[in-house]
Image (tube, rainbow, N blue to C red):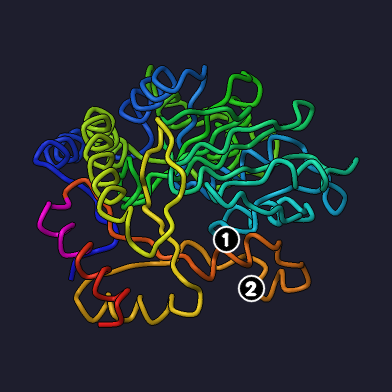
Amino acid sequence: MIPLLKPSCTDEEIEAVTAVLRSGWWGNGPVCEEFERQVAERAGYKYCITVNSATAALHLALKSLDIAWGYHEVIVPALTFVSTALVASYVGARVVFADVVPGTLTIDWGDVLQKITKRTKAIIPVDYAGYPADGHFPSWIPIVEDAAHNSLGEHYGDIVCYSFHPVKTLATGDGGAILTNDPDQASRCRSLRWVGIDRSTWERQEKRYNWDYDIREVGYKYHWNDIQAAIGLVQLKRLSEMNLRRRVIADRYRIALSSSRVELCDDHPRHSNHLFPIRVDADRRNEIIDRMLQRGISVGVHYKPLTYYPMWANHETPPVTYREWRRLISLPIFPDMTDEEQFQVITGLEEALKGR
């Protein structure tokens, strides 16, 4: 079976983890700090705060904005992973669903502008598949960029949130990060990720272990660890190489499928190509997926609209989201994908489109 997505691992990642295991310090420590320093520098933000998932990153980003429970609203695209909207519920905000743009499947900023009210506290655009969702957004409302598909890509958010899930462009087994230029926000997020404690265990360890600390507000156990950060440092070093391979695979798909009965999403010079979505006739989408699976090719759908889930069933599905998700298929793409595997995907898709 050709997988849909797959992490890329070399001996260097294994050796980096082994070094941390032998060091005796497995928790959040010097390796995390070095990873945060390098990511902040490469992304062009002053601060990077690592956490254990992108969901945690998004949650703390909203928490740092002092959203009033039951009053404020957060606008998110209806076509995204569930975490993008769940985090608004975590902080007691009302979720408002915006539509997406047909060409990119990123948030429709025109629709966003129509849905802003005096209660709008934040907007969470999603860099869908790796396409930067930048646009003519309102400068007076905080933009929390969900860059789970777009680590170290082209960023525009006041706050940026990463995912290091096993199949993301920078994969560490799991994890996430928050990027910000606000020192107070960074300090608060650091405390919130460690149950509200004002200094990490490593900070208290550096001179001599100090058991005393302060907790000023309720926090969460969201901190990361040096084992995963060690993988991250190697992946960070390999990121340009892996993204280049993703670009080659994506370009080959674009050329091979240009005359097929499929619709491709728009490209971007800094597209990370975390996913490669195509669109087919809605009434044939599931049949084509089944035919691909029968050929040993994993494909996916990113995503079912969030308005289809019971907790948001009282929300209307935006029209473009409704039309496009029914046509979506994600094709396999990952750095270690071979030319032969991609050839099998392309020929398998062509056969499936013909009904074979």
Image point (63%, 30%), residue name: 188
* Helix, strand or loop under label 2: loop
Q: Is residue 74 left or right of residue 127?
A: right
Is 186 left or right of 296, judged from the image as shown?
A: right
Overall secondary structure of the magenta section: helix
- Where, by quadrant of the figure, is residue 12 drawn? top left
Query: Magenta span has 340?
Result: yes
- CB under 8 Å between discs 1 and 2: yes
> 73 above or below 356?
above
Residue at 25% in and 82% down: 356
Which span is picked out in magenta?
A: 337-345
| Foreground pick, 152 / 56 | 152
* Mark 1 and mark 2: Cα distance apart in space: 9 Å
Q: Is 237 rendered above or below residue 95?
A: above
Relative to 199, 163 lies left or right: left
Is 178 one of the magenta-colored residues? no
Query: For the residue marked with disc 1, what is the amino acid?
Result: Val
Of residues 297 and 34, the one nearer the viewer is 297
Q: Earlier in the sequence, mark 1 or mark 2?
A: 1
Q: Residue furthest right?
A: 118
The residue tagged 1 is 82
Q: Which residue is mark 2?
A: 309
- Say which residue appears at 25% left-offset and 38% top-offset: 231
